[in-house]
Image (tube, rainbow, N blue to C red):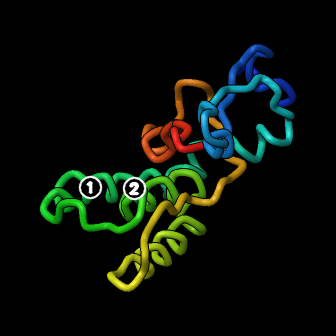
Amino acid sequence: MIPHRDHAHPEPSGAQWVRHRAYYVAVDETPGLPSTLVEEEELRRGRWGWLRAAPSLLLALLIRGYRRIISPLYGQVCSFYPSCSAYGLEAVTTHGVIRGVPLTIWRVLRCNPFTGGGVDAVPATSRIWPQGAVPTIIETNHPPIPRDDDD
């Protein structure tokens, strides 16, 4: 017999969770700080099971392959930060295939010589991860921003 898992308390009460929106912080703040205050509804909506994450994982593998094999041949040609492939990888990882693919396509269409470029972050989601399980692309795309000396 398979033991029943209590869905009202799916993790130990002291579990640390990291929200995707915790990476969108002001200057001089540390992105991605964990929190223990996670409501049951937020946990249900923000933590994906394997069935919901599977399509995103497959597409993420393809994007990682592109970033490893094809992207180095071009060099740094993207006028945005993060690069289009890094943006796509984060969009698919955090939003899923249905919303992540259109976000990525729109970003690639905007990446041309006639735009000014700049910082273009993936929109924040309600996605959460246990501490230590946050995909590295999110930490890479949201580095701490130090204060300018000119302020």
Residue 48 seen in this snapshot? no
SS for callout 1: helix
Marks 1 and 2, how far apart in space?
8 Å
Viewer-proximal residue, 117 or 2? 117
Residue at left 35%, top 81%? 112
Residue wearing tag 2: 86
Q: Which quarter of the figure is the C terminus placed in?
A: top right
Q: Based on the displayed image, in which of its 4 quarters is residue 31 positioned?
A: top right
Q: Which residue appears at 85% of the width and 35% of the height?
A: 40
Q: Amino acid at mark 1?
A: Arg
Q: Which mark is residue 52?
A: none
Q: Quadrant of the N terminus?
A: top right
Q: Residues within 10 Å of mark 2 (few under 14, many from 20)?
A: some
Which residue is painted at 51% across and 63% down in the image?
A: 120
Q: Position of residue 2 (x, y in %)?
A: 69, 22
**Nearest the eye: 98 or 82:** 82
What is the x, y in percent for residue 60? 40, 54
- Residue corresponding to mark 1: 67
- The disc, 1 or 2, on the residue closer to the chain's N-terminal end is 1
